[in-house]
Amino acid sequence: MGGRINMTRDYSNVISKIDGIAEKVYSDLEKAEIPSLQLSTRTKSNIRFDDNLNVWKYGKNKTERAASSLDGAYMLLRTMYMVDFIKDMIKQKKSSTLRETYYISEGWNLAKFSSQNESDLLAEDLEVITGCMREDFKLRPEEDGARVIGNLVVEEVTRNNTKKKIHCQDDVGDAGYGIPYNVEKDKLTFKQFDADFIIAIETGGMFDRLVENGFDTSSRAILVHLKGQPARSTRRFIKRLSEEKNLPVLVFTDCDPWSFRIYGSIAYGAIKTAHISEYLATPTAQYLGVTPSDIVNYKLPTDTLTTEDVNALKSELTDPRFEDEFWKHEIKLQLSIGKKSEQQALAKYGLDYVTDTYLPEKLAELGASKKPKSKKKT
Amino acid sequence: MDAQFLQENGGIILANNNAIAYDLAKKQKEISVAEFFERNKHILGFGNPTRALVTSVKEGVDNSLDACEEADILPEIYVEVKNPSEEECTIIIEDNGPGIIKQQIPHVFARLLYGSRFHAVRQSRGQQGIGISAVVLYGQLTTGKHAKITSKIEADRPAVVVELAMDTVKNRGEVINQDITHWDKPTGTRIEVNIIADYKRGKRFIYDYLQSTSIVNPHARITYKEADGSEHVFERTADILPKKSIDIQPHPYGVELGTLIKMAKETKSRKLASFLKTEFSSMGDRTANAVCEEAKLDRNMNPTDMTRDQFAALHNAFKKVKIMAPSTDCLSPIGETLIRRSLKSETQEISPEFIFTATRPSSVYSGNPFQVEVGIVYGGNLPKDKPIKILRFANRIPLLYQQGDCAITTAIESIDWRRYGLEQPSGNGIPIGPAIFLTHVASTQIPYTSESKEAIADVEAIENEIKLAFRECARKVQTHINKKVRRVKTREKFDLITKILPEIAKKSAHMLNKPVPALDKVITRIMDVVWIEDLVEYEKARGKQVQTKLDVNPQGEREGGWITKSTILVVNYKNKPQKFNLYSIIPKDAIVGTVKPKPAKITDTYIKWSLDNISPTNKVDIYYELAGLNKGDFDENDLYVENINPAYVIGADKWEGE
């Protein structure tokens, strides 16, 4: 189970993968063995860098869910109910949100989920086992896709099955174009554009600042507001756009360990979704700022790191995705100054400082205009 | 000095001091027993106003219980305490006993050291005959008022009411007034006495005392009316009188040299050998001869001719010759079933998790037979972080004071309770936890630490027996807890296989459109045990009363008792067929009815089944009935297995033999 991600929706393949799970359980029972399922262990200790794909994937460690304990048995029962439910949805051409699935489980008696987190995790487990995506299971998340403003035309197949062209500056308001949950080629394609790079922005405040200051026009950038930890659709959008139109990606966030992880999920892949990293990650994305060095160099207003912040930074020191010199240096620096900063702190020097001074300086430093850097690990 | 003068006046001739000795001699006179105790009230338990109150009630109630039991009447005792003024209390104790004949009333109630039980060698509550008279005396001393005794000895005769005073010099009772009155009861005795006592402080002790008394006297019904009018009734939990203790002769080990000489002077036997055989217990021909031989005395010699040296040799011979322990007919222990029933009834509000009891076989100390019974009540609402409550009893009397000096406490403190799950800093001292420990010592001669009979003296033999009894009981507790823990763990797996696994099988089969696979083998793989569980139910029996072994004098026709029905389920969740023996322990006083399937053996302590060839995932249903028990006496089967690895079994322990 696992392997290359299937980009087009071939539901018959999905069904046979799902049946495969039921078959494993059934044949275990037939052989008078305690039924069990194996899946890759989804922790920091089991991710490794795949040289071919240039992203982080799960390693060899496996976790077993077996019916030899009460908890394991409940898990397997829920799995059976869930895959049966997915099969039904595919047959009936319906879909459901993850939250709806959680509520539907109320009618599954013993197999009821005790929290939504449980059902979300199970959906991810199924992705890992089968190599399919949630969307293949007809499961939609709640998450919001991000907003986009820039010189780019997208063509979207709308809900009434018509194709609609949208220019992400002329055809949208100040809030920009909203990325839908499905950003596959059957739903969304990229048409004309006129830009030099994509800049992914963590906070709405900074996104609005760049919009108000006309940064997309002045610097020929496509602005993408991440809305915090980016949704799969956002990451997928950025990846597709970057690769299809050969545009470098720069990530602009606050300066704290949680924001570093936002960058990580864009560039390297998230630990939770390592099985589909190559699908969602943009390995060439670079971190623009705010860095701890920036805090020092630009003398930005700061807050003190909390205990959780410090622990998160220390954890990142042992996260294989942050194992290069740049990150090691920056994280250690931050631990030593003991401070964090928001990206909007740049307003200290005036509302236009970020677009007039900071960003141009950083862009020059990165030589970001044209060439994507390769992030090969040693 | 005039010799005649001296002689006439009985003086001793001394050098020049004879006058002083004579003077001193004049002042010496006999002190009456009553006068002695008048000045030493604390010895009898009247040392302070709170104590005085409790002791007074105690003496009266003890008397009533003894009287009823001797007359084979199920005791109905009524205790009332009034508090007419701050310092003064009126105590009324009434019973349905046989009554006391008029002439004896002054002797029983107003004469110290007068009683029928002092000379008897058997278990009884009041041994010295001091009790109730001390109350009358105390009342008189402190309030100046006389006691009032009402007594009725025959149903168709009126009751006699006597106002009684005590002459402390003569140690005699004095009837101040006498009257006749009508009394509804067929027979009975009632005492009313006024004493100075601390009612506020003492009333709680009275309640505790009466409750404790009720626990160890399940055959008695006690009503307690307080000064504010509220009434408590301690109902009886047994309809049968305790086995009567029988008089036995003294045992050689317990007899002092002086007593031996006295006995020889008073005996009717002309020969030493027959003197030994008739006046002592455990003396048969062989033992008597062995003793004579050891003492180098002629078995045919006349006891009255013996010298002091010869008595001393005889006394020594007792110690050297092996003499059997005395028979225990003289004892009347409460019995495990009744202790349990009593405790259960009295601790209902606490809702304890479990109650366990243990009875030791009777034993001897210094020639006196004795027997120890214990009970442990655990859990429920009892406080977890306080020291355990200790209930002490001697000859069915609660011991309320001097807990620290008592052999029972010493025994409990010296056991390391930590291994039984109670807290106990450094492994000695009173343990801490949610438990009540009950101890009853029955004996023909309880060695009290003092005259007030509040604590048992530290006799090694008694202490040892108490420790053994508690260890036995604690082991039962441990076994029970272990069984529960293992069962909870296996119950989870049980849920797994009975509920969840079939669902998984159904779902996967449904998805693949295949038949549901058989789960037997997987079940045995997951469970991998032999599962045994039991259920006890009760059904009211109809018709004639059941004759039980406890009952010697049935109190008339009883409406039918209860049938205790046990169902035992044995399931083989191992992947190989199993064959083993199953034992279920039954109480000694139960009668076994139907048993299915046919057992291999039934004794008075267990039922044994030989279970043959139970295939994997198959079960055996066992059912049996017990009669002669009250509802709730037997509520859980104590199960054991033999010829199977006990680690495979949930719900039963290893059979260690009878």
Image: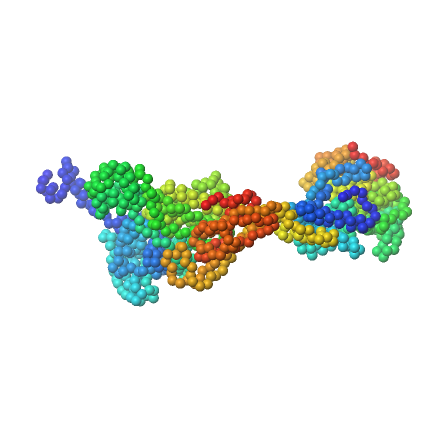
| Quadrant location, the N terminus of chain A | top right
**Residue located 37% across and 51% down the image:** B332
Closer to the camera in the image, B71 or B651: B651
Please tell me in which quadrant of the rendered image residue B275 appears: top left
| Quadrant location, the C terminus of chain A | top right
Q: Taking A250 as reference, is B353 left or right?
A: left
**Residue located 51% across and 50% down the image:** B609
Residue B214 appears in the rendering: no
Residue A271 appears in the rendering: yes
Counting from the top left corner in percent of width and height, residue A210 is at 83, 45
Counting from the top left corner in percent of width and height, residue B140 is at 29, 55
Please tell me in which quadrant of the rendered image residue A284 appears: top right
Please tell me in which quadrant of the rendered image residue B552 appears: bottom left
Counting from the top left corner in percent of width and height, residue B647 is at 56, 43
Closer to the camera in the image, B373 or B563: B563
Q: Taking A116 as reference, is A221 left or right?
A: right
Counting from the top left corner in percent of width and height, residue B500 is at 65, 51
Q: Is residue B310 above or below residue B370?
A: above
Q: Is residue B41 above or below residue B72?
A: above
Q: Taking B454 as reference, is B587 left or right?
A: right
Number of numbered discs overlaid on the protein picture: 0
**Residue located 79% across and 55% down the image:** A91
Closer to the camera in the image, A254 or A274: A274
**Residue located 68% across and 48% down the image:** A29
